[in-house]
Amino acid sequence: MHWDQAKETFIYQQTEASIKWLSQFSNSDGEGVTRLVYTNPWLLAQSALQEKCEAMGLETRMDPAGNVFASFKGNEQGVVLTGSHIDTVKNGGKYDGAYGIVAGLVAIKFLQEYLGIPKKTIELVSFCEEEGSRYPLTFWGSRLITEEVDAIPSVQEDKGHITLKEAMNDVGLSIDELSLIKKRNDIQAFIELHVEQGMRLEANEKQIGVVEQIAGVHRFTVTVTGQANHAGTTPMTMRQDAVYGASQMIQWVTEQAKQYGEPFVATVGQMSVKPNVPNVIANEVTFTVDVRSPQPDTLQTFKEEMTTVFKKIAVVNDLDIVVEQWLATPPIMMDSELTATAKAICDEQQLSYQMMTSGAGHDAQIMAKHYHTALLFVPSYRGISHSPLEHTSTADLAAGVKVLVELLYRLAY
Amino acid sequence: MHWDQAKETFIYQQTEASIKWLSQFSNSDGEGVTRLVYTNPWLLAQSALQEKCEAMGLETRMDPAGNVFASFKGNEQGVVLTGSHIDTVKNGGKYDGAYGIVAGLVAIKFLQEYLGIPKKTIELVSFCEEEGSRYPLTFWGSRLITEEVDAIPSVQEDKGHITLKEAMNDVGLSIDELSLIKKRNDIQAFIELHVEQGMRLEANEKQIGVVEQIAGVHRFTVTVTGQANHAGTTPMTMRQDAVYGASQMIQWVTEQAKQYGEPFVATVGQMSVKPNVPNVIANEVTFTVDVRSPQPDTLQTFKEEMTTVFKKIAVVNDLDIVVEQWLATPPIMMDSELTATAKAICDEQQLSYQMMTSGAGHDAQIMAKHYHTALLFVPSYRGISHSPLEHTSTADLAAGVKVLVELLYRLAY
C-alpha cells in the first residue's frame, strides 16, 4: 500500500480522537481510568462501542459474556479478528487494552475508506474482561470464546460482596447463558495491538515490538492464620502473629525472585489483615503472589520452593497456612508466519522495531493456542503501567495502527 | 463488713445478670461484641445504662463527649468514682470495660441495699471511648474529663469515611461542646475494675490482681511510599515496592521486641495497601506500630532505633517514609495508699491475690495523674482478650466486686 500524508494524518487523528473518546468511560474513584467488568462504566463503554461501530455500517453483537464483536463483512469465507480488552485495573491508564480496540476500530475505518469491501471478514473484538481486577477472571473473555473455562465461579464475591452472578445480572447478562458460547472455527488469524507496559522499547528507541512469546503466569492466594490477642499483654514469645509470619514470607518472595534473575518476576500486590486494628495481634493475613517466567520449569521450581519455605515459616511461628493456586498460564509462542510478516512490514515501512518477549499476559496468549496469532507492542513512557500516568505518544500509537492496517490488508484483501 | 451467704449470692447473681445484660448491645458484624464509639449500639448501651441507674434512684447525666455518670448521693462533700469504658474493639468480648461498669453498678446496688446513704457521693462512670478502635481516640473519655485533650480531630475519618464531627452528630452530640468539659476537683478517689487481658493470674491461680503500675504505650502510623507498576514487566531490580519495604520493617519490629525481652512488646496490628490488586506493585503501605513498656527510657530507645532502621530500609529500597507518632502515654504508678488498702482487704477476706504491672492501658492511668487511683484485675481465661472468646468466671468477677464494695465502704461511709 502507498502511504501519503493524507493517510498518515487520517490514522493519526482518528487514533488520537478514539483514545480520548474511550477514556471517558470510567468510574469516579480516584485518578486515571477505572472500568471494572460488569460495572456501569464497563457497560457504557461496550454499548458506546457497539453504537459507534453500527454507525460505521458494521454488524455488531454482544455475546453472553459481554464480549462485543463488530464485523466488516467480506465477500468470501473466513474471518480475520483484531482487538483487545475493554476492562482496566483500578486507577489504570487510557491505553492498556483500549489501544488494541481503538487500533482495530481505526484500521477498519481506514480500510473502509481507502480499500472498500475485503475478501475475508475483518472483525473487531472488545473482550469483556482480561485483568481479573474485580473477580479472579483473568482472560475471561478470550477463555470463554475458546471454551477454555471449565467451572464458572458464580458465587465468587467482589470486595463489595457482590457475586459474579449478581454482577452479570446488573448489566443485563445471565451467567447461565455462558455455556451457549461455542468455539468458532472461522477465525483465520487474530492480531492484538497493545502497549508494552515495560521500558525496553523506549530505552532502545524502537516504535514497534514484534512479540515472539509471552511469559507464563502463576497466581496464588496465601492465607496465614494465627491467634488474635491483646497487643499489650501477650508476651512476644507466646504469639501466633499472622502479620509477622506473612512479612517473612513476603520478604522471601521478593528476595528469591531477585536471586532467580531476569526475566523472572514475583510480586505480592494484594494483602488483607484481620481484624486489622492497631492494638490486636492479627489472627489472619491473606495475600496474593503473582509469578512470571518464559520458562515452565522455572515456574514449577519456584512454586515448590515457595510452598516449602512458607510451610516452614508457618511451623516455626505456630501458624496455619493455605496456599491456593488460582492461575497457571503456561508460556506461549506466537505464530511464526504472522510474526515474520509483521517484521517484514516494519522493514518495508522503515519503522524502528525489535523482536521481544512479553512479561505481561494478553488475550493473545489464549487465542494463540487455537488460532494463528500475532501480538505487537508500542512503547510505554518510562514503562509505567496500570497507573493513571500510563502514556504512549500518538505518533507511536499511529505507527502500530499502520502495521495493523498492512497486516489486515495482507490477510483479508 | 460481715459477708454472709445472702450477700455473696446477691453479688454473684447481680454480676452475672448485668454482664449478660450489657453484652446484648452490639452491632451484628461477625462474632462477639462490637460497640464502637458514637455508633448506634454504643448509644443504646449508654442510654440503657442511664435508664437502669435512674430506676435505681441515681441521678444520671451524659456529658458533651457521651461519658455517662450516675450518682449515689452522699450526705457530705466529696465524690468517690468507680467505673470503666463502655466501648469495645471490633469483635471483642463481654468483659473488657463492661466489667468495670457492671462492678460499679452492682457495688452501688449492694451498698444501697445493705448500708444505705453514704457520707461521700459514690459515682459510677461509663467512659464513652477508651480503645481507639473507630478513631485514634484512645482514653478519649478519661482524657476529656481531665482536660488532657489539646486538639480535637474533628475531620478525622473512620474506615467508612465518616468524620468524628459527623459521628458525634449522628448520636445527638456536638463536637463544639467538648470545650465545655472542665476538670472536676471533687473526685477524691477513682477505682477501676478490669479483666487482666493476660495470663498471669490464671497461671498463678490468683483471683485478684492489685496493680501497682501501668506500662507506657507508644503508637505510630508508618506510611511507606513507592511506585505502582506492572507486576509482570517491571524487573525486580527496578522496583519501588512498598509491600516489600513494609515487610522488612514489620519483621524488624517483631524481632527487635523479642531481643528487648519481657515485658517489652511491639505489634503491627493494622495494615493497608494501595492499590491492593494482585498484578500491581504496591505504591503505598500504611501500618501501625503499638509499643509498650513500664520503662520510659526503653520506649524512647526503641522509637529512635525504629525510626533509624525504617529510614535505612526506605533508602535502600528507593521508598519514601513517614513515621507519625499519635500516642505517647508514659508509664504510670497507681496510688500507694489505695493500693495498700486493696491489698489489706484481700488479706482480710482471704482472697488469693498478687501485686502486678498492667501491660494494657486503662482509663486508670489517665485518672491516676489527677486523682488517687487504684486498678484491680480479675483473671482472663487463657489470657484471651479483644476476642469473642474472652472469658472470666462469675466467681472471679464477683470476688472483684466484693473488694470494690469493701473499698467503697472504707472510702465513702
Image (cartoon, coloured by chain):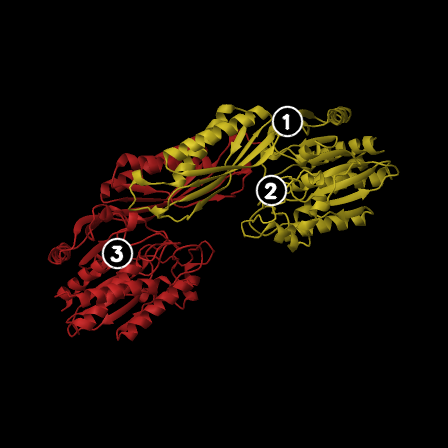
Chain colours: A yellow, B red
- Amino acid type indicated by mark 3: His
- Amino acid type indicated by mark 2: Gly
Residue at 68%, 52% (x, y): give it: A174
Q: Quadrant of the N terminus of chain A?
A: top right
Neighbour class for label 3 at 10 Å: few (<14), some, many (≥20)? many
- Amino acid type indicated by mark 1: Thr
Circle 1 is placed at which residue position?
A357
Helix, strand or loop at label 3? It is strand
Residue at 44%, 40% (x, y): give it: A224
Instruction: Kindly identify which numbered label has been placed on residue A132.
Output: 2
- Tell me the CA gap for discs 3 and 2: 48 Å
x, y percent for residue B145: 27, 62
Neighbour class for label 1 at 10 Å: few (<14), some, many (≥20)? some
Q: Quadrant of the C terminus of chain A?
A: top right
Whether discs 2 and 1 lie on one chain: the answer is yes
Question: Is residue A155 in view?
Answer: yes
Residue B179's place in the image compared with B287, above or below, is below
Whether discs 3 and 1 lie on one chain: the answer is no
Depth check: B152 or B361 in front?
A: B361
Badge count: 3
Q: Is residue A120 left or right of residue B44?
A: right
